[in-house]
Amino acid sequence: MTEAKKTPLLDDLEKGPWPSFVTEMKKAAANNLSAQDLLGQLELSYEDKKAHWKHGGLVGVMGYGGGVIGRYSDVPEQFPNVEHFHTVRINQPSGWYYNTKALRQVCDVWEKYGSGLTNLHGSTGDLVLLGTKTEHIQTIFDEVSSFEEHPMDLGGSGSNLRTPSCCAGPARCEFALFDTTDLCHELTNEFQDYLHRPMWPYKSKIKISGCPNDCVASIARSDFSFQGTWRDDIKIDQEAVRAYAEGGFDIQGLVIDKCPTKCMSFDGSELKIDNANCTRCMHCINKMCKALRPGDDRGATILIGGKAPILQGAMMGWVIVPFMKIEPPYEEVKEFLEKCWEWWDENGKTRERIGELILRLGMRNFLRAIEREPIPQMVVAPRANPFFFWWPEETVQD
Ligand code: HEM
Ligand code: HEM
Ligand code: SF4
Ligand code: SF4
């Protein structure tokens, strides 16, 4: 056993009301050497105000090109038990619904071969096992993937399809406009090859929300953002509306006046919505969920291009398909994704996200490749400059 190092700076973070990660790490360190050395190395980082991991690291399991993030300490002589400290991404169940059996199994494996430390969950969604040695990676994979009940596979990493994730969905949300958990599960299975074997210019992410509240923040954190929507009328229960009014709820001030398109009115007894001008922002439904419900003609809006700043600046997804029916076996969704990926794979530069490629080559080239017409819903405003390109066939040739 390495002698437990003193950690005065970290100890400070055990004070205060929020659950302390230091306390949790100490629990793991009580019977795990690498958790103990991790505390030591972290204390050193707090002293030095810099990381003590070496650059990069390439490890994995046979047959896959991603799923494990290799990491090596740059002070292994001080902390030999974190000399290797690789991270294993395990694909989470859609919506992060577990039973205790599933969690116990993975904990048993992780206690045997890892640091006992986890991240529930990584930002993309994976169940993250934090810290193991190269020689254990294959064993961990073999064991978790052969559980009799609830076997688990690795998630994605590298220039590939990353682990898709979705909101809680219809399992416990009355706003869900399609089965987010089912679509997420189905796409994960359908595109296993893209997920496990990086073959693209860069990463590609899918996130799925059941309505425009977008509880998995798909618009900001995924190249392909699915958000449930509807295209018929909002369902109004006028009795329930009146009950809100009688209960002292300020319908005019908190709902009518805040509708972004000003398409609602309330005369004290009846609520009216001009649905043709409703943009399905969810506000009135969020505020009066006992009286208002999304319509019955349901599907999703698909947005493309969400990404973080590097290289061309941060982007939020923008509309590419205003409405698509989302029903098993999801053929239209799959075809759409395949077309987008194919064009990107053909044209993308190394480490160019699909949003950046569209920025570089233009929507007209992208839309032509995926066989979709440009429509007004794709833009906030028409272009303000006149530098317009015509297709050669659109110009008059003498
Ligand atoms: C000090 C004033 C100006 C400077 C330094 C300037 C500079 C330039 C430069 C460097 C370009 C080439 C951009 C590129 O290809 O990337 C350009 C293009 C252009 N400029 Fe100017 N410009 C000036 C004033 C104007 C004015 C006053 C107009 C119109 C009233 C104008 C109209 C254009 C147009 C139409 C193009 C595009 C040409 C094309 O590529 O088809 N410019 N300008
Ligand atoms: C009495 C003054 C001017 C005359 C007679 C004149 C004439 C012309 C002519 C005949 C053309 C070619 C049009 C074509 O090929 O169809 C042209 C193009 C152009 N002129 Fe002028 N021009 C004048 C002043 C200016 C000024 C002051 C500017 C900029 C401030 C300017 C900017 C341009 C540009 C940018 C083009 C190219 C437009 C394009 O690429 O389609 N012109 N001008
Ligand atoms: S995104 Fe919509 S459907 Fe999904 S959990 Fe949030 S509110 Fe519910
Ligand atoms: S969903 Fe939004 S835009 Fe539509 S009526 Fe309600 S508040 Fe107005």
Image (tube, rainbow, N blue to C red):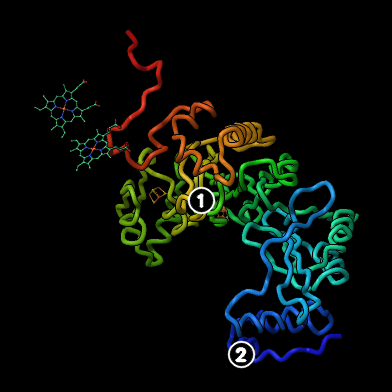
Horizontal relation, residue 49 to residue 125: left or right: left
Residue 182 seen: yes
Which residue is more in the foreground, 181 or 207?
207
For residue 197, above or below residue 329: below
Work out whether residue 7 or residue 231 is closer to the camera in this orientation and state it.
7
Residue 79's place in the image compared with 68, above or below, is below
Assign a secondary structure to mark 1. Answer: helix
User: Percent from the top left, x then y, of residue 329?
Assistant: 69, 35
Ligand 1 location (quadrant): top left
- Residue position marked by numbered label 2 in the rendering: 12
Residue receiving disc 1: 219
Indicate the position of residue 256 as horizontal and vertical percent values: 33, 54
Left or right for 359, reference 352: left
- For the residues carrying marks 2 and 1, which lies nearer the camera in this image? 2
**Vertical position of residue 327 compared to residue 133: above or below:** above
Question: Sequence order check: which comes first, mark 2 or mark 1?
Answer: 2
User: Viewed as shown, does residue 146 lie left or right of 126?
Assistant: right
> Can residue 325 be seen by looking at this rendering?
no
Observer-nearest residue: 7 or 374?
A: 7
Instruction: Name the disc covering residue 156, or none.
Output: none
* Residue under the image location 45 percent in, 58 percent down: 288
Q: Answer yes or no: disc 2 within 8 Å of ligand 3.
A: no
Q: Residue 98: percent from the left, percent from the top?
A: 75, 61
Q: Residue at x 36, y 50 (%)?
A: 271
Seen in the image, is 51 located left or right of residue 152?
left
Determine the residue positioned at 54% across, 29% down. Answer: 370
Q: Amino acid at mark 1?
A: Ile
Q: Looking at the rendering, which quadrant does residue 2 occupy?
A: bottom right
**Position in image of residue 311 (x %, y %):** 49, 52
Picture residue at 61% right of the left edge, 54% below the top: 167
Q: Secondary structure at mark 2?
A: helix
Crowd around label 2: few <14 · some 14–19 · many ≥20 (10 Å): few
